[in-house]
Image (cartoon, rainbow, N blue to C red):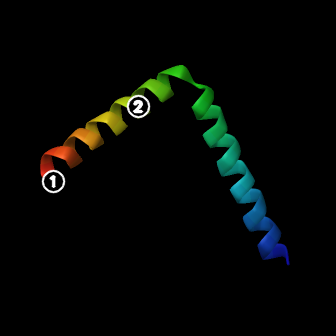
Amino acid sequence: MVQGSGFKVQRFLLTAIADFFDRDPTYQARSNERNGFLRTVKKNSL
């Protein structure tokens, strides 16, 4: 029971951190850049 609730708390924290970074415009721009780069790499490798 304690283990399960600990996992829930951990998951909640990770979600909160992800939400925080999603609101950070510089992080968003960087992740969009990275995703675009990965898409390009995938396209080139196909």
Q: Mark 1 against mark 2, which lies toward the viewer?
A: 1
Numbered circle sitting on residue 32: 2
Q: Secondary structure at mark 1?
A: loop
Badge 1 crowding class, 10 Å Cα cut-off, few under 14, some 14 to 19, many 20 or more, is few
Residue 42: % across, % down: 22, 48
- Which residue is outermost to the right? 1
Measure the C-alpha gap from mark 1 to mark 2: 21 Å
Badge 2 crowding class, 10 Å Cα cut-off, few under 14, some 14 to 19, many 20 or more, is few
Taking the spot 71% from the left edge, 58% from the top edge, the residue there is 10
32 relative to 4 in the view: left or right: left
Taking the spot 48% from the left edge, 21% from the top edge, the residue there is 26
Q: Dot 1 corresponds to which residue?
A: 46
Residue 13: % across, % down: 71, 49
28 relative to 41 in the view: left or right: right
Rendering quarter of residue 11: bottom right
Amino acid type of the residue that numbered disc 1 sits on in the rendered structure: Leu
- Which residue is outermost to the top? 25
Taking the spot 65% from the left edge, 33% from the top edge, the residue there is 20
Contact (CB < 8 A) between labels 1 and 2? no
- Which residue is outermost to the bottom? 1
Residue 8: % across, % down: 77, 63
Foreground residue among 28 and 9: 28
Taking the spot 58% from the left edge, 33% from the top edge, the residue there is 21
Position of residue 46 relative to residue 37, above or below, is below
Position of residue 25 relative to residue 22, above or below, is above
Foreground residue among 13 and 46: 46
Q: Secondary structure at mark 2?
A: helix
Amino acid type of the residue that numbered disc 2 sits on in the rendered structure: Asn
Q: Earlier in the sequence, mark 1 or mark 2?
A: 2
- Quadrant housing the N terminus: bottom right
